[in-house]
Image (tube, helix red, strand yellow):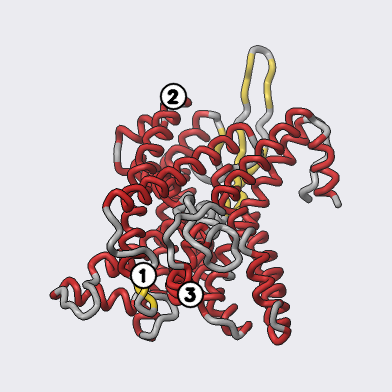
Amino acid sequence: MNVLTALRSAMQVPELRRKLLITIGLVCADRLLASITIPGVNATALRDLFTTNGLLGLLNLFSGSGFSGGTGFGYSGISIVALGLNPYINATIIMQLMTVISTRVKEMSKEGELGRKRITQYSRYLTVALAALQSFGFVRLFQSYTFQGQSILSPTLPWPRVAGIILILTAGTVIIMWFGELITEYGIGNGVSIIIMIGILGQVPGTVLGLGHNSSQIFTLFMFCVIGVVVSAGIIYVQQATRKIPIQSAQRVQGRKVYQGRSSFLPLRVNQAGVIPIIFAVSIMFFPTLFGNFFSPPAGQSGGALGTIAVWIHNNWNPFGPNLTVDILYEVAYFGLVMAFTFFYTAVTFDPDDTADNLRKNAVFIPGIRPGGQTAEYLSRVMGRITLAGAIFLGVITVVLPIVTALATGQQPSTGLYLGGTAILIVVGVSLDTMKQLETQLLMRQYRGFIR
């Protein structure tokens, strides 16, 4: 009720009402584009591909059912925004990583608003290049995959038609990237995160109806609800968790007035990286699948050593696949990548040296720790410990929880993968961030917040 009261209060403020309406309108436009499909797609072969490859199903989750027609009710085709915001997210991550690798990009990031605008512009250019490359890879994948002798896309498509599909998919990514930036600038919340969240929520009705259609699966639906509630509570607890480091401001003298020092704390989030490591790990894990489908020779032909490797990857590199050894290797690699990217992304977003330098410049210190180098070492050591906890949490959510969900519900493992903690983590995390922003806007106008 408090949330509804706050939304009603926000709608009474002209500025907030405009922000909410812009956000809702752009989200509806995104879902409308997701329902427009590319002609000439074999829906039966497409359904078989995504039901037999859990990793592709996870990519479909991130794209908001873009590979299933955007509705969440079966696989009706490939929408014009099938790539979703994955190219944009990868481009953003690459530019953030460049701030560590490239001195020029790091200096640019410190140039204030002008520097940030230039980095954003470079991210847009890189998004177009990555979207075109991924579009080409998916087209080759859909042309090479066959089900009952039929391909998802005809292998004999003329090159102008292939170029047109690549152009359409790339343009779709650019359009929803623009939508996300408009929401961030003129709406409420982070536009990219909101579009991904709405895409995930759009798949819930189809999933619920698919399970509830059969009376024998009512218990399964109940188990999904219980697991969802428990996992949501755990995610909220971890997402809100912080390590509070006590800090003390020194006594200051201004003119004839003496200002006594104040005690406060420096909050360090346990999950500093959010869901970004999962998205980047999925992109890396998908590269072998693209390689396998790109270089696999046609049926009945030998492609040499490279073709043999590609065929093996195509048949085995898949979570819950037919090869148990490869399945275990896949899960271990996935878990390791999530942890590695959690540490790496945290190192990019949190610099202990800069934080220690800012504390020193503001005459703030940690009791018992000398300012400067010792403060930076202490912050690095504390951040390393809590990041380890956050990385393990993300690994459990993305790898262990889907397996537990599949065992508890008796569903196919791939279904457990789709409904695992990754989707819940995104939905809960984005919802909390958006609610906090709305609460901040309300508090600025002397409304009572609704987050306790």
What is the x, y in percent for residue 106?
36, 35
Horizontal side of residue 205 vs 118, given as left or right: right
Horizontal side of residue 171 vs 262, given as left or right: left
User: Residue drawn at (55%, 48%), measured in percent from left and top?
Assistant: 33
Closer to us: mark 1 or mark 3? 1
User: Residue drawn at (61%, 63%), measured in percent from left and top?
Assistant: 203
- Which numbered disc flags the more N-terminal residue, 2 or 3? 3
User: Residue drawn at (61%, 38%), measured in percent from left and top?
Assistant: 248
Return the mark for residue 447.
none
- Read off the residue under disc 3: 51
Q: Residues within 10 Å of mark 1 (few under 14, many from 20)?
A: many
Can residue 341 be seen in this snapshot?
yes
- Which numbered disc flags the more N-terminal residue, 1 or 3? 3
Horizontal side of residue 61 vs 231, given as left or right: left
Mark 2 → mark 3, Cα distance in angstroms: 46 Å
- Read off the residue under disc 2: 114
Amino acid type, callout 3: Thr
Element under label 3? helix
User: Residue drawn at (78%, 50%), measured in percent from left and top?
Assistant: 452
Q: Is residue 206 above or below residue 406?
A: above
Horizontal side of residue 360 vs 328, given as left or right: right
- Read off the residue under disc 1: 151
